[in-house]
Image: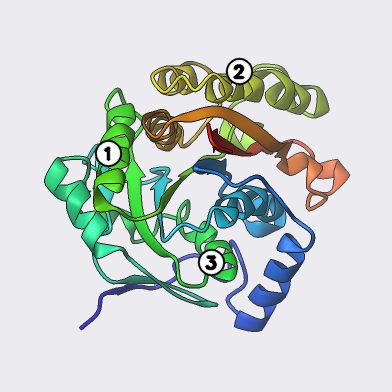
Amino acid sequence: MQKLRPAAVAGRFYPRDEGECRGILEAFFQAVSAPAALGGIVPHAGWIFSGSTAALTIAGLAAARPETVIIFGAVHGPDRNVASVFARGGWQTPVGVLQVDEGLASRLIRSGAAVDDASPHKYEHSIEVQLPLLKHVLPDVRIVPVGVRPGSEAAEVGRRCAREAVASGRRVAFLGSTDLTHYGPAFGFEPHGRGRAGIRWAKEVNDRRFIALIQAMDADAVVPEAEVNRNACGAGAVAATIAAMAELGAVRYEELRHTCSAESGAVEDEDLLNSVGYEAGVFIGAAS
């Protein structure tokens, strides 16, 4: 029997109803274009906050027509592994099932790039919220979901995954999922005061420190940066993505949008005490 992971956050981070999902997806991708990309960075908040931002990156991946996408997810819950891969079956979404590329997942496990462990993925949302977007623009794409802990080994995970992707002979793209600074009393982080001034600092200063390292494609620096300045929740996923992109010959990172939840219009003005940063961008190869 095929192993299917149920949609854990449908109805909370995005609609559970198929028709409602499809309507929002159509709006996200209407008139959106992005350069064909080897990979990219996406946010993973609820769609009302960051879905349209994530769609920009995913449009860039779709332009490259990959057969498989390796998705490096943030780790918000317990995970004893450096990297945990969901290796068999599929992931359910309201708009259909995305099948795991079991052959490539097996290669990652044999190479030591990731451990075969589906348990950390059971409730983790950072990969799940991307999947309906991928399914919408790439109906037949396969996925390899990999949760990557933020640690010194995260970049090596990306390098090994890239080598195995090449060796597989498949057209493989990469996504790294992170949100940026979580600022405000809800997160216990207000070094520059409460309200608009602090939120502005979080986006314009603290987020930009982290983004600058993505732009520099400095895979080894992003995890220490996030540890010191609390400006990314998926630094391990970003480190793995940057390292994979360098291994595959990406020559630059092109930012598509940098925003935050306070700018989304989903928060009332009087409630602007908390904000989370969102980044979308793509890695471009030499031939593009």
Q: Which residue was labeled with disc 2?
A: 209
Classify residue 186 by image quadrant.
top right
Camera-nearest label, 3 or 2: 3
Residue drawn at (71%, 57%) of the image: 48
201 or 268: nearer the eye? 201
Which label is found at residue 163?
1
Which label is found at residue 47?
none
The residues tagged by marks 3 and 2 sit, at their Cα atoms, a distance apart of 33 Å
Q: Upstream in the sequence, badge 3 or badge 2?
A: 3
The residues tagged by marks 1 and 3 sit, at their Cα atoms, a distance apart of 23 Å
Q: Residues within 10 Å of mark 3 (few under 14, many from 20)?
A: many
Q: What amino acid is labelled 2 in the image?
A: Arg
Residue drawn at (45%, 34%) of the image: 238
Counting from the top left corner in percent of width and height, residue 268 is at: 84, 49
125 or 175: nearer the eye? 175
Q: Upstream in the sequence, badge 1 or badge 2?
A: 1
Q: Residue lying at the far right in this picture: please name it.
A: 269
| Left or right of 103 on screen, residue 194 | right
Give the structural element (helix, strand or loop) at label 2. helix
Give the structural element (helix, strand or loop) at label 1. helix
Q: Which residue was labeled with disc 3?
A: 138
Counting from the top left corner in percent of width and height, residue 272 is at: 79, 39
**Quadrant of the frame with the N terminus:** bottom left
| Left or right of 254 on screen, residue 93 | left
Counting from the top left corner in percent of width and height, residue 80 is at: 21, 41
